[in-house]
Amino acid sequence: MAAAERRKGARVVFERGLDAHMMAIDGTWRRACTVEDVSEIGAKLTIEGSVEGLNLKEFFLLLSSTGLAYRRCELTWVNGDQLGVNFLRPNDKKKRAGERGKPQTATT
């Protein structure tokens, strides 16, 4: 199945790419990247430099130099220097944690 067929949302493709940065959730690392395309639910990024040894499971995508425009991301795929990410919404983590923390009820 081609990548375009797996996509759920319409994508906006940037002709020259959009300069951005990736940053660890805890701020321990930061890398320059280019946003190649974006949708409501995710994006395709091209990374500058090595990502070896970095925790890429979740990170921030900084879209402005001041850090006021950003998205929390989870890694979905890697192909060389390109990454696919899904954007996490603020309630996503709470729902997952809430589901794990619910007590099990017995049925009669």
Image (tube, rainbow, N blue to C red):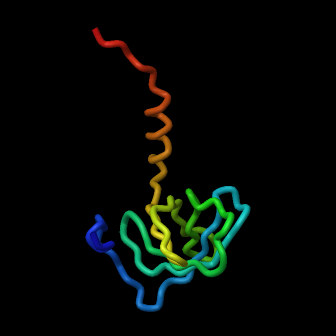
Vertical arrangement, residue 25 with respect to residue 84, above or below: above
Vertical arrangement, residue 92 with respect to residue 33, above or below: above
Q: Quick check: 83 left or right of 49?
A: left
Q: Quick check: 22 left or right of 41?
A: right
Which residue lies at the image location 44% right of the left edge and 62% below the top edge? 86
User: Where, quadrant-wise, is the N terminus in this rendering?
Assistant: bottom left
Which residue lies at the image location 45% right of the left edge and 74% below the top edge? 44
Please name whichever residue, 4 or 43, is drawn nearer the observer in this view of the structure.
Answer: 4
Which residue lies at the image location 50% right of the left edge and 37% below the top edge? 97
- Outermost residue toward the bottom? 16
Q: Quick check: 2 left or right of 34?
A: left
Which residue lies at the image location 50% right of the left edge and 59% below the top edge? 74
Q: Quick check: 70 left or right of 36?
A: right
Q: Position of residue 105 (x, y in %)?
A: 38, 16
Q: Position of residue 70 (x, y in %)?
A: 54, 67
User: Where, quadrant-wise, is the C terminus in this rendering?
Assistant: top left
- Which of the 4 quarters of the picture holds residue 5? bottom left
